[in-house]
Image (cartoon, rainbow, N blue to C red):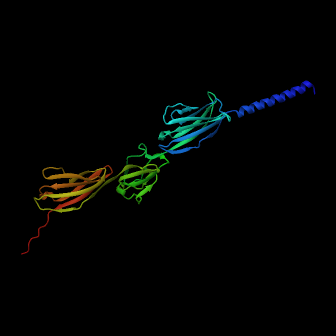
Amino acid sequence: MHFSQIFLVLWCGLSLRSRVLAASTAVSSAPVISDITPDLVASVGDDIEFNCTVENVGRMSVSWAKRTSEIGSVVLSMRNILSLSDPRYTIVETNDDKANKATYTFKITKIEATDMGAYECQVILTATDKITKKLNVAIKHPAIISEENTPKSMLVTEGQNLEISCHADGFPQPTISWERENRAIMPAGGSSFDGQTLRIKEAHRLDRGGYYCIASNGVGQPDRRLIRVEVEFRPQISVQRPKIAQMLSHAAELECTVQAYPAPAVFWYRNGGKLQSGSNYKISNTASSHESTTSILRINSINELDFGDYYCNATNKLGHADARLHLFQPVIPVPSM
């Protein structure tokens, strides 16, 4: 082999080796985030700190940033300088010049619920390139029932199924249970029910009332929310005295009680005609409870034409009901001779 050829081979080999060594040196000197604090769980009011160790840090810019859904991220610190003037924040840079690494310790005192989220350690390489590692900070806070996603009241027609969902926020994730107002028995039996959704199968008018959604996660006091359940049903009429005896020229009262929701319109009829309050008749309707109405027809002075059948009629949007009452003249026994 000619000397020039031998020289060329040796030169190429040395050149290749020098490039490999240069590349190896460049790789080994590139910054690396070698350690970051694991995810943290704390309570409101605690003090926390998290560390990020960067090897081959050199003169690189290292920052802590908090991820936010609104604007992406907010830079909290740059090396040993805070970017935000929050008195609760502290940044400490600890350098190890021999190892060419540094640890950046970010501290937050008296943490608040808003401090929860993802925090990133960032090493800025260029204007468009960086290396990152992140940790999550979870903050325990009491259960809070969502007003937007939990109803204040529910309406169901008797016989239909009803579902009531209760949503709560908090950390740890709250559990949901249900109780009735005044510790009444639940529709499915028992004094309570566990689960986010309360299901009432074939609702009955007796299921109406207040139901407490109770959210608890072991932090602080459970949150409670009262949800009113109304059950619509068609009128039902009860009459305690369907037959009323009274003498001529005396007054008589005919009474019926209506159970219905929504509240019914109650009228009295005689011989197919609607009766109105006037000189001889007086009609009064009194709501004695949320779903009960008592109607009284008073006849001021009975004459022969007033004897016979009267009808109490109740109507709401779900239907109507009638009840017959009979007014008659008592027979006075004639003494025997």
- Residue most extreme to the left: 337
Check the image and report above or below for 149 versus 100.
below
Mark yes or no: residue 320 visible: no
Check the image and report above or below for 4 versus 303.
above
Q: Does residue 77 appear to the left or right of 177 in the view shown?
A: right
- Residue most extreme to the bottom: 337
Q: Quadrant of the C terminus?
A: bottom left
Mark yes or no: residue 104 visible: yes
Q: Position of residue 171 (x, y in %)?
A: 49, 46
Q: Quadrant of residue 30?
A: top right
Check the image and report above or below for 321 versus 139.
below
Image point 23% across, 52% down: which residue?
Answer: 286
Task: Return the residue nearer the eye: 214 or 205.
Answer: 214
Q: Position of residue 200 (x, y in %)?
A: 41, 54
Task: Return the residue nearer the eye: 72 or 310.
Answer: 72
Q: Quadrant of residue 330?
A: bottom left
- Residue most extreme to the right: 1
Q: Quadrant of the N terminus?
A: top right
Q: Does residue 306 appear to the left or right of 21 in the view shown?
A: left
Q: Position of residue 172 (x, y in %)?
A: 50, 48
Task: Return the residue nearer the eye: 209 or 28.
Answer: 28
Q: Position of residue 290 (x, y in %)?
A: 29, 52
Count up the numbered dots.
0
